[in-house]
Image: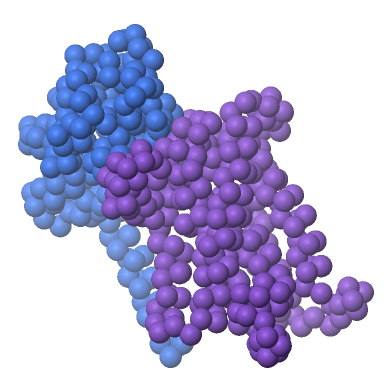
Amino acid sequence: MSRRSRSTSGRLPLALLVPALLGLAFLLVPLIGLLAKAPWSTLPQRLFSTDVWQALKLSLLCATAATAVCLVLGVPLAWLLARGELPGRSVMRAFVTVPLVLPPVVGGVALLLVLGRRGLIGQHLYQWFGISLPFTTAGVVVAEAFVAMPFLVISVEGALRAADPRYEEAAATLGAGRWMTFRRVTLPSIVPGIVAGTVLCWARALGEFGATITFAGNFPGRTTTMPLAVYLALETDPDVAVVLSLVLLFVSVVVLASLRDRWISGMR
Amino acid sequence: MFRRTAIVAAAVVAALTLAGCGGSAASSSSSSGTPTLSGDITVFAAASLTGTFTRLGKDFEAAHPGVKVNFNFAGSSALAKQIDEGAPADVFASAAPKNMDEVTDKNAPTTFVKNTLEIAVPKGNPGNITGIKDFADKTKKIALCAVQVPCGAAADKVFKAVGITAEPDSLEQDVKAALTKVSLGEVDAALVYKTDVLSAKDKVEGIEFPEASKAVNEYPIATLSRAPNPAGARAFVDYVLSDKGKTVLTAAGFDAP
């Protein structure tokens, strides 16, 4: 399979190859800039400060929790958009993409207006249960899930629309209910789409800055994720910011590369 | 269609080039002693000066017909970096002497205003904040600026002077973010500048405290030595330092230096 695709690469048309390589270079050059600027001699001592590990741990935890939230809510939402015969589905689909176009800082303010201590829903949470989401780790998860969910929903919906509905119809004629069909037939057939969406969603959550700092604030160990630490380091010590960015990049590349193998095996 | 676009683009480029030449010619002639100003003046100013400098720019344009004042408002450290990377600025007004020091190609800076810290609480003071000592109270929701940005460094100095350890719930990336948390009622108090309290006076109340004098922030302004319009730069700085300039700045809550 892979050998055959390699042998066809010799016949790749230049009209595709040139822009493709330009595109790759465009994405890689800023990374090279970071690598070139990195203070390699002092890197180890900067790396082993507790602040860095604290921020990294928090970033991984929150991005993973946000991705879990997105999976639980996003896959059913994608199913509803692709299969549910509801009026106004195209409007719903447009609303799903709102967090993509909204500047994340505005998204953070919107979350404050709804879930903040004086927000539409948040004031009741606070009065009745004493729950206040801003300035908590849970708040970071909420902000990241808000921004990252569309990536998952769009991927999964695309997979659902591409999936052959005849299998679901066959399951239905054999007496399976809609829930059973979803679990046993639909879900397994869209695994590659879910994995791709999960990867995108996790990566977006990991890099989230604007909504997080606006909604959850910034406090070391509680809400300071790596992107927030990078931003603040940039104010005083750009070298530290470069080191932190490299750590974030390295970790995300390792995680995504290891997931990619699963994704490709799922594609077969 | 494509050809027409190309012609239009070429015309625009030519016009811009001519305008550029005109601007530099005008400024070089005015630097030779004539008081008439012309061309564009590009002012890089700290974000906290957005309101006052926009106003001063309009007044300045009214006083000097034919002159256009363009502003670039952003965080002082970002502006200092842009200037050092060769951004074509005539004037730099920084919110901290430190960021002014980072700029190499400048003429001697002057301190034109000072800004004092003040406690900001949501309207009605729901957290019952009475003074700076409340910032050490763990039960109160507190937002401060991160120590890496000027307002955070100033707050740190105040707490050292008072002798308390602050218990913040969030360290915000800039003073406006801290103010937003107060105006939305998410925190009981934040330490911001007097000018910020005034700018949000329908949602925020200010509480002055004596120790604020321990951490007064000075704002320096300077003309830049590679200014494309040196005469205009000088005239604008003089205008900011004039009595008219002072009136606008003090009305917004700045203190005279």
Chain coloured blue in the rendered structure: B
In this picture, is A85 found above or below A39? below
| In the displayed structure image, the side of residue A130 where residue B212 appears, left or right | left
Tell me the residue at 14%/39% (across/down): B201
| In the displayed structure image, the side of residue B46 where residue A151 appears, left or right | right
| In the displayed structure image, the side of residue A31 where residue B114 appears, left or right | left
Tell me the residue at 11%/55% (across/down): B65
Chain coloured purple in the rendered structure: A
Quadrant location of residue B180? top left
The residue sitting at the front extreme is: A175
Task: Return the x and y of residue A123 as percentages of the image width and height.
Answer: 29, 46
Tell me the residue at 45%/44% (across/down): A139
Quadrant location of residue B155? top left
Task: Return the x and y of residue B158 as percentages of the image width and height.
Answer: 31, 16
Q: Nearer the viewer, residue B130 or A130?
A: A130
Q: Which of A48 and A130 is in front in this view?
A: A130
Whether residue B86 is visible, yes or no, is: no
